[in-house]
Amino acid sequence: MKIAIDIRRMTEFGVGTYIRNIIRTLGRLDHENQYFLLGSPTKVEEIGPLPGNFQTIPLAHPEHTLKGYREFRSALRKLDCDLVHIPNLFSRPRFLPCPYVMTVHDMLEHMSRPRQQGVWRWIYFQMTKRVLAGAARIFAVSNFTRNEIEKLFEIPLNHIEVVYNAIDERFLHGHATAADRDLIAQRYQVSYPFLLYAGRISPHKNVLRLIEAFSALKTELEKDQLWPDLKLIIIGDDLSGNPDLRRTVVRSGVQNEVRFLGFVPIEVLRIFYDEAKVFVFPSLYEGFGLPPLEAMAHGTPVITSNISSLPEVVGNAAVLVNPENVFEIMRAAHRVLTDRALRDRMKERGYQQAKKFSWEISVRRLLDVYREVGRAGGRETVRQSAAD
């Protein structure tokens, strides 16, 4: 088969991790089908060496433009592809010359917007519904996301495959060495115990409540004369669009205890995961939620939310909290920090939980669906009501 994969969003945070790892794993598992990677050749270099059945097809125009859409469609036609995998919820893959399969990471865009009945919101919702209904198959990254798709857009569940994410293999390179610890001490001036958050800095990530919980935690620890040097380190995108975070730090009186490091490369992030005393991820909504698994792969105890996909992902290996309750987050962190036996149990459970998710298992399922769609020779029919 000739299979195209849209790689234009490879530089994005979560989607980029997904694209890099499915292509890297396909390169190891499949030397028979022919793959065309549609997007920037420089982005493909981040994946590493690929076998000869992989070819990059450069696209010059931005994705969300008419020229970009026409260029994408024209490339598929010239290549005579059997199908194309669109690894994100793309708004306009209609009228393509071959079937498309699509990965949906979450439904956040349709959950977090105000529920006004404006015409543009209605149009956008209907476009998304048609795109999902037109897909030959949909890959959801969790059962939670699968159920959200069915509930919001009335797509039949038997048309949606659950294909889990997994962590990037670079997080499996063992524990931090003395040289690694020296690196973060010298480059980032981090040589003290810390709680860690890593991920996007956006409202649904609930970082404001994390800061408030940390402030309350410091007060409790001071009463017990424990962990006097404990800090909170926040790794993610920049703060320019979230001034409330800085204000919350000042209002909570922890401006000397909270550090925002911005983006750090994976090779450095793995050191922070490994050195953190506790990883705290109180997100209000996740389609999957990779950071808790990344922390578990390093034996770091995890505190995360008891809602959305997170209980499904972390199983019994994390302490689950109500993310809207600041004091519940604080009490969980206090318990993990002060209970050595609990930390040891969480460490072992975390290792085992992280091993349950594998890119090889997930990509083998993708390949099965690719073959099913290729044999069908066209889009599978979804009940008409889903497209109306």
Image (cartoon, rainbow, N blue to C red):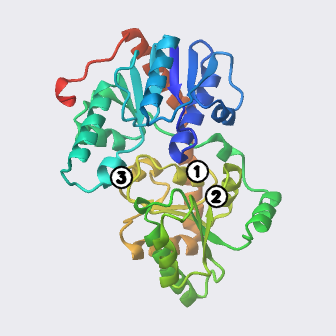
Q: Which amino acid does label 1 sit on?
A: Glu
**Residue at image mark 3:** 308
* Neighbours of disc 2 within 10 Å: few (<14), some (14-19), many (20+): many
The image shows residue 131, relative to residue 123, as above or below, that is above
* Neighbours of disc 3 within 10 Å: few (<14), some (14-19), many (20+): many
Task: State if disc 2 and disc 1 touch (CB < 8 Å).
Answer: yes
Q: Position of residue 30 (x, y in %)?
A: 60, 18
The image shows residue 68, relative to residue 288, as above or below, that is above
| In this rendering, position of residue 6 left or right of residue 272 | left
Question: Which label is found at residue 294?
Answer: 1
**Residue at image mark 2:** 273
Q: Looking at the image, can residue 43 be seen?
A: yes
Q: Which residue is drawn at 68% across and 63% down?
A: 275
Q: Quadrant of the C terminus?
A: top left
Q: Which amino acid does label 3 sit on?
A: Ser
Q: Toward which corner of the image does residue 189 lie, by quadrant?
A: bottom right
Q: State the CA–CA distance, disc 1 to disc 2.
A: 8 Å
Q: Which of 306 and 199 is in front in this view?
A: 199
Q: State the CA–CA distance, disc 1 to disc 3.
A: 18 Å
Q: Which residue is drawn at 40% across and 46% down?
A: 287
Q: State the CA–CA distance, disc 3 to disc 2.
A: 23 Å
Question: Which label is found at residue 23?
Answer: none
Mark 3, secondary structure of its residue: loop
Q: Residue at x 54, y 50 (%)?
A: 293
